[in-house]
Amino acid sequence: MSFICFNGKLVSEDVPVLLAANRSYRYGDGLFETMKMQKGELLLKQLHFERLFSGLTILKFELPVFFTAGKLDDEIKKLCQKNNCEALARIRLSVYRGNGGLYDGGMKPGYVIECWPLDKEENKLNENGLVIDIYPDARKSCDKFSNLKSSNFVPYAMAALYAKENELNDSLVLNVHERICDSTIANIFWIKDNLIFTPPLSEGCVAGVMRKYLLEKLPRLNYRIQKKILTVTDLLAADEVFLTNAIKGIRWMKQFRDKSYNADKTVEIYKSLFP
Protein backbone atom coordinates (compact mmCIF):
# COMPACT_ATOMS: atom_id res chain seq x y z
CA MET A 1 0.00 0.00 0.00
CA SER A 2 1.25 3.47 -0.91
CA PHE A 3 0.50 6.71 0.91
CA ILE A 4 0.08 10.38 0.15
CA CYS A 5 0.37 13.41 2.42
CA PHE A 6 -2.82 15.48 2.59
CA ASN A 7 -2.44 18.74 4.50
CA GLY A 8 0.18 17.19 6.75
CA LYS A 9 -1.51 13.82 7.33
CA LEU A 10 -0.42 10.52 5.82
CA VAL A 11 -3.36 8.69 4.24
CA SER A 12 -3.69 5.76 1.86
CA GLU A 13 -3.46 6.84 -1.78
CA ASP A 14 -6.85 5.24 -2.53
CA VAL A 15 -8.69 7.40 0.04
CA PRO A 16 -10.59 10.35 -1.56
CA VAL A 17 -9.30 13.63 -0.13
CA LEU A 18 -10.42 16.46 -2.46
CA LEU A 19 -13.93 17.88 -2.69
CA ALA A 20 -15.71 18.65 -5.95
CA ALA A 21 -15.53 22.30 -4.86
CA ASN A 22 -11.72 22.23 -4.85
CA ARG A 23 -10.56 25.40 -6.65
CA SER A 24 -7.65 23.68 -8.35
CA TYR A 25 -10.07 21.14 -9.82
CA ARG A 26 -12.61 23.81 -10.77
CA TYR A 27 -10.35 26.57 -12.03
CA GLY A 28 -6.74 25.36 -12.10
CA ASP A 29 -6.21 27.72 -9.14
CA GLY A 30 -2.96 26.39 -7.77
CA LEU A 31 0.66 25.50 -8.36
CA PHE A 32 2.74 22.35 -8.30
CA GLU A 33 6.38 21.37 -7.95
CA THR A 34 7.92 18.22 -9.40
CA MET A 35 11.02 17.35 -7.40
CA LYS A 36 13.63 14.64 -7.24
CA MET A 37 14.87 12.93 -4.10
CA GLN A 38 18.16 11.09 -4.01
CA LYS A 39 19.63 9.37 -0.96
CA GLY A 40 17.00 10.94 1.27
CA GLU A 41 17.58 14.54 0.17
CA LEU A 42 15.69 16.78 -2.24
CA LEU A 43 17.85 17.95 -5.11
CA LEU A 44 17.86 21.71 -5.85
CA LYS A 45 15.60 22.12 -2.83
CA GLN A 46 16.21 25.82 -2.33
CA LEU A 47 15.40 26.64 -5.95
CA HIS A 48 12.19 24.60 -5.82
CA PHE A 49 10.86 26.30 -2.71
CA GLU A 50 11.92 29.74 -3.95
CA ARG A 51 9.85 29.19 -7.09
CA LEU A 52 6.90 27.79 -5.16
CA PHE A 53 6.65 30.61 -2.63
CA SER A 54 7.29 33.27 -5.27
CA GLY A 55 4.41 31.83 -7.31
CA LEU A 56 2.10 31.68 -4.30
CA THR A 57 2.84 35.34 -3.63
CA ILE A 58 2.05 36.26 -7.25
CA LEU A 59 -1.24 34.38 -6.96
CA LYS A 60 -2.03 36.21 -3.70
CA PHE A 61 -2.31 33.16 -1.45
CA GLU A 62 -2.63 33.89 2.26
CA LEU A 63 0.13 31.74 3.75
CA PRO A 64 -0.22 30.56 7.37
CA VAL A 65 2.81 30.87 9.62
CA PHE A 66 3.24 27.10 9.73
CA PHE A 67 3.30 26.77 5.92
CA THR A 68 7.07 26.87 5.41
CA ALA A 69 9.70 25.27 3.21
CA GLY A 70 11.10 23.47 6.25
CA LYS A 71 7.75 21.91 7.11
CA LEU A 72 7.13 20.79 3.54
CA ASP A 73 10.64 19.36 3.28
CA ASP A 74 10.09 17.30 6.47
CA GLU A 75 6.76 15.99 5.24
CA ILE A 76 8.19 15.02 1.86
CA LYS A 77 10.96 13.05 3.58
CA LYS A 78 8.51 11.28 5.90
CA LEU A 79 6.29 10.34 2.98
CA CYS A 80 9.18 8.94 0.95
CA GLN A 81 10.33 6.93 3.95
CA LYS A 82 6.79 5.60 4.44
CA ASN A 83 6.68 4.54 0.79
CA ASN A 84 10.25 3.14 0.86
CA CYS A 85 11.47 5.24 -2.04
CA GLU A 86 13.81 7.76 -0.42
CA ALA A 87 16.82 6.32 -2.31
CA LEU A 88 15.53 7.72 -5.62
CA ALA A 89 12.07 9.22 -5.99
CA ARG A 90 9.89 11.61 -7.95
CA ILE A 91 7.80 13.93 -5.79
CA ARG A 92 4.81 16.03 -6.76
CA LEU A 93 3.74 18.77 -4.36
CA SER A 94 0.38 20.30 -5.37
CA VAL A 95 -0.85 23.47 -3.65
CA TYR A 96 -4.41 24.72 -4.15
CA ARG A 97 -6.48 27.64 -2.91
CA GLY A 98 -9.14 25.98 -0.75
CA ASN A 99 -12.68 25.19 -1.87
CA GLY A 100 -15.50 27.30 -3.27
CA GLY A 101 -16.53 29.54 -6.14
CA LEU A 102 -14.64 32.36 -7.80
CA TYR A 103 -15.87 34.95 -5.28
CA ASP A 104 -16.52 32.93 -2.13
CA GLY A 105 -13.54 30.59 -1.84
CA GLY A 106 -10.82 30.71 0.79
CA MET A 107 -7.42 32.29 0.24
CA LYS A 108 -5.33 29.88 2.32
CA PRO A 109 -3.51 26.93 0.78
CA GLY A 110 -4.24 23.26 0.98
CA TYR A 111 -1.75 20.76 -0.37
CA VAL A 112 -1.15 17.19 -1.46
CA ILE A 113 2.24 15.45 -1.65
CA GLU A 114 2.75 12.33 -3.75
CA CYS A 115 5.89 10.28 -4.42
CA TRP A 116 6.95 7.42 -6.67
CA PRO A 117 10.18 5.41 -6.99
CA LEU A 118 12.40 6.33 -9.93
CA ASP A 119 14.39 4.01 -12.13
CA LYS A 120 18.17 4.43 -11.94
CA GLU A 121 18.16 5.15 -15.67
CA GLU A 122 16.78 8.60 -14.80
CA ASN A 123 20.27 9.43 -13.48
CA LYS A 124 21.85 8.91 -16.89
CA LEU A 125 21.99 10.94 -20.08
CA ASN A 126 19.61 9.46 -22.66
CA GLU A 127 21.35 7.11 -25.08
CA ASN A 128 18.84 7.66 -27.87
CA GLY A 129 18.30 11.27 -28.85
CA LEU A 130 14.83 12.77 -28.71
CA VAL A 131 12.68 13.26 -31.78
CA ILE A 132 10.61 16.42 -31.39
CA ASP A 133 8.31 18.74 -33.33
CA ILE A 134 6.11 21.77 -32.57
CA TYR A 135 2.58 21.50 -31.20
CA PRO A 136 0.55 23.61 -33.66
CA ASP A 137 -2.65 24.34 -31.73
CA ALA A 138 -1.64 26.50 -28.72
CA ARG A 139 0.10 29.82 -28.09
CA LYS A 140 1.33 30.70 -24.61
CA SER A 141 0.90 34.19 -23.26
CA CYS A 142 3.88 36.22 -22.09
CA ASP A 143 2.40 37.74 -18.93
CA LYS A 144 3.42 37.45 -15.27
CA PHE A 145 1.55 34.15 -14.89
CA SER A 146 3.20 32.40 -17.83
CA ASN A 147 6.35 31.49 -15.86
CA LEU A 148 4.42 29.75 -13.07
CA LYS A 149 4.26 25.99 -12.61
CA SER A 150 0.49 26.29 -12.76
CA SER A 151 -2.21 23.68 -12.17
CA ASN A 152 -3.82 25.12 -15.31
CA PHE A 153 -1.78 22.90 -17.63
CA VAL A 154 -4.05 22.46 -20.68
CA PRO A 155 -1.65 23.67 -23.44
CA TYR A 156 1.06 21.32 -22.19
CA ALA A 157 -1.34 18.42 -21.67
CA MET A 158 -2.56 18.77 -25.24
CA ALA A 159 1.00 19.12 -26.54
CA ALA A 160 1.91 15.88 -24.76
CA LEU A 161 -1.09 14.16 -26.35
CA TYR A 162 0.01 15.48 -29.75
CA ALA A 163 3.49 14.05 -29.18
CA LYS A 164 2.05 10.65 -28.29
CA GLU A 165 -0.28 10.60 -31.29
CA ASN A 166 2.58 11.49 -33.64
CA GLU A 167 5.16 9.13 -32.12
CA LEU A 168 7.33 11.98 -30.86
CA ASN A 169 9.30 12.07 -27.61
CA ASP A 170 8.08 15.58 -26.80
CA SER A 171 6.46 18.66 -28.33
CA LEU A 172 7.63 22.26 -28.34
CA VAL A 173 5.18 25.02 -27.42
CA LEU A 174 5.00 28.41 -29.14
CA ASN A 175 4.20 31.76 -27.55
CA VAL A 176 1.90 34.47 -28.92
CA HIS A 177 4.83 35.83 -30.97
CA GLU A 178 5.17 32.49 -32.82
CA ARG A 179 8.47 31.80 -31.07
CA ILE A 180 9.47 28.66 -29.16
CA CYS A 181 9.24 29.02 -25.39
CA ASP A 182 9.61 25.49 -23.97
CA SER A 183 8.35 21.90 -24.27
CA THR A 184 5.62 19.98 -22.46
CA ILE A 185 7.80 19.12 -19.46
CA ALA A 186 11.10 20.90 -20.00
CA ASN A 187 12.99 24.07 -20.86
CA ILE A 188 14.97 24.20 -24.08
CA PHE A 189 18.63 25.08 -24.69
CA TRP A 190 20.50 25.14 -27.98
CA ILE A 191 24.16 25.37 -28.93
CA LYS A 192 25.56 27.29 -31.88
CA ASP A 193 29.30 27.85 -32.45
CA ASN A 194 30.06 26.79 -28.83
CA LEU A 195 27.63 29.36 -27.40
CA ILE A 196 24.74 28.05 -25.28
CA PHE A 197 21.36 29.78 -25.54
CA THR A 198 17.98 29.54 -23.83
CA PRO A 199 14.85 31.72 -24.16
CA PRO A 200 14.39 34.46 -21.53
CA LEU A 201 11.42 34.20 -19.15
CA SER A 202 9.82 37.10 -21.02
CA GLU A 203 9.14 34.58 -23.83
CA GLY A 204 6.54 32.84 -21.64
CA CYS A 205 8.44 29.69 -20.66
CA VAL A 206 7.99 28.06 -17.27
CA ALA A 207 10.68 29.24 -14.85
CA GLY A 208 12.36 25.86 -14.66
CA VAL A 209 14.47 24.96 -11.66
CA MET A 210 17.05 23.07 -13.73
CA ARG A 211 17.09 25.97 -16.18
CA LYS A 212 17.97 28.38 -13.38
CA TYR A 213 20.60 25.99 -12.03
CA LEU A 214 22.29 25.80 -15.44
CA LEU A 215 22.20 29.58 -15.88
CA GLU A 216 23.99 29.95 -12.54
CA LYS A 217 26.34 26.96 -12.81
CA LEU A 218 27.56 26.87 -16.41
CA PRO A 219 29.37 30.26 -16.38
CA ARG A 220 31.32 29.07 -13.33
CA LEU A 221 32.46 26.11 -15.41
CA ASN A 222 33.63 28.51 -18.15
CA TYR A 223 30.75 27.88 -20.55
CA ARG A 224 29.34 30.87 -22.40
CA ILE A 225 25.59 31.11 -22.07
CA GLN A 226 23.08 33.74 -23.19
CA LYS A 227 19.32 34.31 -23.08
CA LYS A 228 17.92 34.77 -26.58
CA ILE A 229 14.59 34.42 -28.37
CA LEU A 230 14.22 31.13 -30.23
CA THR A 231 12.64 30.90 -33.67
CA VAL A 232 12.17 27.82 -35.83
CA THR A 233 14.94 29.19 -38.06
CA ASP A 234 17.31 29.36 -35.06
CA LEU A 235 16.45 25.80 -34.10
CA LEU A 236 17.12 24.50 -37.60
CA ALA A 237 20.49 26.31 -37.61
CA ALA A 238 21.59 25.00 -34.20
CA ASP A 239 24.46 22.55 -33.78
CA GLU A 240 22.96 20.83 -30.73
CA VAL A 241 19.72 21.04 -28.73
CA PHE A 242 18.88 19.73 -25.27
CA LEU A 243 15.95 19.83 -22.86
CA THR A 244 16.14 20.22 -19.08
CA ASN A 245 13.94 19.50 -16.09
CA ALA A 246 14.35 18.60 -12.43
CA ILE A 247 13.75 14.86 -12.86
CA LYS A 248 15.72 13.98 -15.98
CA GLY A 249 18.35 16.72 -15.76
CA ILE A 250 19.49 17.01 -19.39
CA ARG A 251 18.19 15.12 -22.44
CA TRP A 252 19.68 15.65 -25.88
CA MET A 253 17.63 16.04 -29.03
CA LYS A 254 18.46 14.01 -32.11
CA GLN A 255 15.95 15.30 -34.62
CA PHE A 256 13.61 18.21 -35.30
CA ARG A 257 11.74 17.73 -38.56
CA ASP A 258 14.42 17.12 -41.20
CA LYS A 259 17.29 18.48 -39.08
CA SER A 260 19.55 16.06 -37.17
CA TYR A 261 21.78 17.05 -34.27
CA ASN A 262 24.83 15.62 -32.55
CA ALA A 263 25.43 15.66 -28.80
CA ASP A 264 29.18 16.19 -28.41
CA LYS A 265 29.00 19.42 -26.39
CA THR A 266 25.88 18.28 -24.55
CA VAL A 267 27.66 15.17 -23.32
CA GLU A 268 30.54 17.32 -22.11
CA ILE A 269 28.14 19.65 -20.28
CA TYR A 270 26.30 16.71 -18.71
CA LYS A 271 29.53 15.19 -17.41
CA SER A 272 30.59 18.59 -15.98
CA LEU A 273 27.30 19.01 -14.10
CA PHE A 274 26.59 15.43 -13.08
CA PRO A 275 29.96 13.69 -12.67
Image: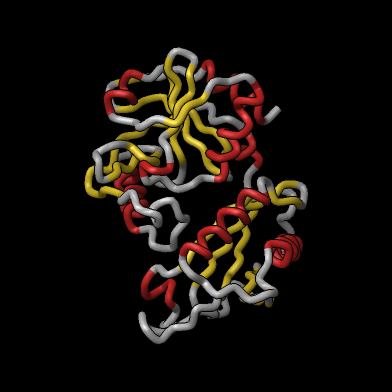
For residue 194, say whether it is visible: yes
In this picture, is 133 found above or below 27? above
In this picture, is 25 found above or below 36? below
Q: Quadrant of residue 267?
A: top right
Q: Quadrant of the C terminus?
A: top right
Q: Quadrant of residue 171?
A: top left
Q: How is the image coloured?
A: secondary structure
Q: Position of residue 212 (x, y in %)?
A: 56, 40
Work out whether residue 119 or residue 113 is closer to the camera in this orientation and state it: 113
Work out whether residue 200 or residue 15 is closer to the camera in this orientation and state it: 200
Q: Quadrant of the N terminus?
A: bottom right
Q: Quadrant of residue 4?
A: bottom right
Q: Position of residue 181 (x, y in %)?
A: 36, 40
Q: Position of residue 177 (x, y in %)?
A: 25, 41
Question: In the shown orientation, is residue 133 left or right of residue 126?
Answer: left
What residue sits 62% from the left and 19% below the top? 222
Hey, which residue is sitting farthest top in the picture? 193
For residue 1, say whether it is visible: no
Work out whether residue 25 or residue 57 is closer to the camera in this orientation and state it: 57
Q: Position of residue 89 (x, y in %)?
A: 66, 52
